Amino acid sequence: MPKISVLMRRIVAVRAGGYCEYCCCSEQYATESFTVEHIKPKQAGGETVLENLAWSCCGCNAHKHSKIKGLDLETREKIALYNPRHQLWSEHFEWSDDFTQVIGKTPCGRATVDALHLNRFGVVNLRRLLRSANLHPPE
């Protein structure tokens, strides 16, 4: 398996615009560094190619790990997780009224919110602070 090159890492980071492609946390204000994440994990046969790489905060990356499916708590079905290369964030997620919580609009969105813990305590607090400074949500 090829390693992620410095150039690939830079392309993935720039493509994401400085935000986690899952929870939309801003890299600029994050307390931990971001990483390149395999959308389809290497353990599941995912390749190290730009089409299979996403920019992820450490929290989302740690919770996703090798998952490719999650449980939609509404339908109780196993559903493929959100793929930022093939799906639009706005089709599967929306913000709560106060913009601190990510809400899944579809089975895929709900499964991803649950599996990746998109509303982790620290991320919700960060969103609240950034919102008060008019720096959240991202456009």
Image: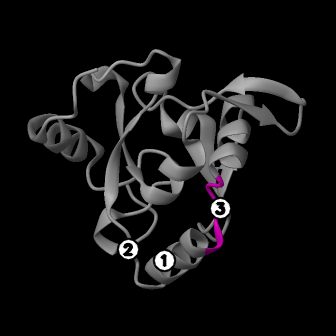
In this view, the residue in front, 90 or 10, is 10
Q: The residue under label 3 is which amino acid type?
A: Asn
Residues at marks 1 and 3, CA–CA distance in whole angstroms: 15 Å
Position of residue 46 measured from the top left corner of the image (x, y, whole percent): 42, 19
Circles 1 and 3: CB distance less than 8 Å?
no
118 is within the stretch colored magenta = yes
Labels 1, 3: front one: 3
The range drawn in magenta is: 117-121
Work out whether 23 lies above or below 104: below
Position of residue 49 measured from the top left corner of the image (x, y, whole percent): 26, 21
Position of residue 105 measured from the top left corner of the image (x, y, whole percent): 70, 39
Q: Which mark is residue 119?
A: 3
What secondary structure is marked by label 1? helix
- Residue at 61% from the left image edge and 69% from the top image edge: 100
Residues at marks 2 and 3, CA–CA distance in whole angstroms: 18 Å
Return the residue at label 2: 135
Circles 2 and 1: CB distance less than 8 Å?
yes
Return the residue at label 1: 131
- Residue at 35% from the left image edge and 55% from the top image edge: 19
Report which quarter residue 138 is drawn in. Answer: bottom left
88 is within the stretch colored magenta = no
